[in-house]
Image: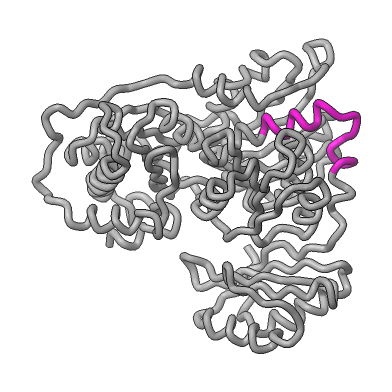
Amino acid sequence: MLGRVFKAYDIRGIYPDLLTDYMAWQIGCGSAKFLLNEAEQDGESTPMMRNVIIGRDMRVSSPKLSEELIRGLTSAGASVIDLGMIDTPMMYFAINYLDSAGGVVVTASHNPPQYNGFKISKRKAKPVGETTGLDVVRKNAAMVDKNLTPQPGTSVDPRDLWKAYAKHVKKFLDLGDHDDSNPLKIVVDASNGMAGTMCPNIFGKNGEATEGLDIIEMNFENTKHEYAHEPNPLVAANLEQLQAEVIKQKADLGLCFDGDADRCVAVDEKGQIVPCDIMTALLVPYFLEQKPGAAIIFDLRSTKAVKEEIEKFGGKALRGRVGHVFMKQLLAENEGIFGGELSGHFYFRKNFNADSGAIAMATFLSVIANTDQTMSQMTKPLMRYVQSGEINFENEEKDLALEQVIESYGDRGEIDELDGVTVDCFESEGWWMNIRKSNTEPLLRLNIESKTQETLDEIYTEVSSMLGSRVDH
């Protein structure tokens, strides 16, 4: 039963049907054993190395799961620093700021309200995924002694780090010549999630603590457990309210956050959604001006325009696997300055190589504030190719389908299997595609990009017959 809630990057399930209070205690025990052992192997022994930081999102089940998580952590010998309700990126800051053994956030990110789960990070906010320790946490949790109780000498210390966190985030904000007489106007949709707590604590209510910024707040209430829409900004329907408000308010930009506020999706001043890979491409010159020649990372689903922009401005383009575990690792190993993922995660070297919705927001605002162009004017030249968007296909024989794709396209272009199967015929035929397996469902995920809509339609017709039944949701 415990194994069903452990995913590739985190722990997640419907509460209390699949994810239970007892499991939260088990996971607390398993996490403490893993994190304390990892810290000990690092060779550093300080009082903070016995501390595990916890925080939680706004879900109705989060307080109880936090309580059981704490009981498990202290039963396995960890002391706990409890940050209360936080956005997930605040955890990455806190682990480094307090130099702790690691941290656990109680959250189910963008999933609907009935879900909950845990995101675990070790020292220096390094992610804990299936291949970087989550399997060990699961084994530890499964073997825990049911009679364990909180150990003598452990403690639970509530802590408020919002002022320190706000100071850190605002290092990334430069509003140029904008002041209170000429503010940058933006609409922020918090999706009734943790951005409703994060934004006022960092930028002030309606942006009043930040000179030159006017924030129009939408769906900031996050304690009544009522949702204007699901907290997933990658679903276009969830952005309709934001799009309408941006146009109504004549705002410079709209931003929508997911439930735990680690992902951020932009809407331009015309109310048009800006794909996250286009935002990555837009930020390339901004970061390469700070560090010429630096590496910038992007996930392999991103438009070709990202690589082209990186090379145009003299940077090193690094294409990576999908998922924050892989993206953070790639950024750290190559001392990259910035990275972006199609899912709305943006990664920053000066943020401990971690992703942050708040810092993405600060960076977007800095770029807009220091140009005479609107967002739509800046992004138009970058949207030079046609994209299918991610299309899902139900298929119980995923590996066989991928083998068929390789066999069918092997003679036409370059094929790699970094993450799923990528077929690149861009130079010869003007298109490329990637097909990945879902980690949790019997689904194949297809992305196609081409130079013309006609070519895209042709390739889609060819390949879709190999992938199974299309799923539209």
Side of 334 where 4 appears, left or right:
left
Q: Residue at x 30, y 45 (%)?
A: 38
Tell whether position 370 is magenta: yes
Tell whether position 275 is magenta: no
| Front in this rendered view, residue 451 or 460 | 451
Q: Residue at x 30, y 28 (%)?
A: 48
State the extent of the magenta-drawn residues as a range. 361-378
| Front in this rendered view, residue 169 or 396 | 169
The N terminus lies in quadrant: bottom left
The quadrant holding residue 245 is top right
The quadrant holding residue 104 is top left
Does 212 sit above or below residue 345?
above
Q: Residue at x 76, y 21 (%)?
A: 175
Q: Is residue 229 visible?
A: no
Q: Position of residue 10 (x, y in %)?
A: 42, 52
For this orientation, the residue located farthest to the left is: 147
Colour scheme shown: one colour
Q: Position of residue 271 (x, y in %)?
A: 81, 41
Q: Is residue 163 visible?
A: yes
Does 3 sit above or below residue 185?
below
The C terminus lies in quadrant: bottom right
Does 473 sit above or below residue 342?
below
Q: Residue at x 21, y 57 (%)?
A: 142
- Name the magenta segment's main secondary structure: helix
Q: Position of residue 378 (x, y in %)?
A: 86, 41
| Front in this rendered view, residue 442 or 311 | 311
Q: Position of residue 359 (x, y in %)?
A: 62, 32
Side of 473 where 65 appears, left or right:
left
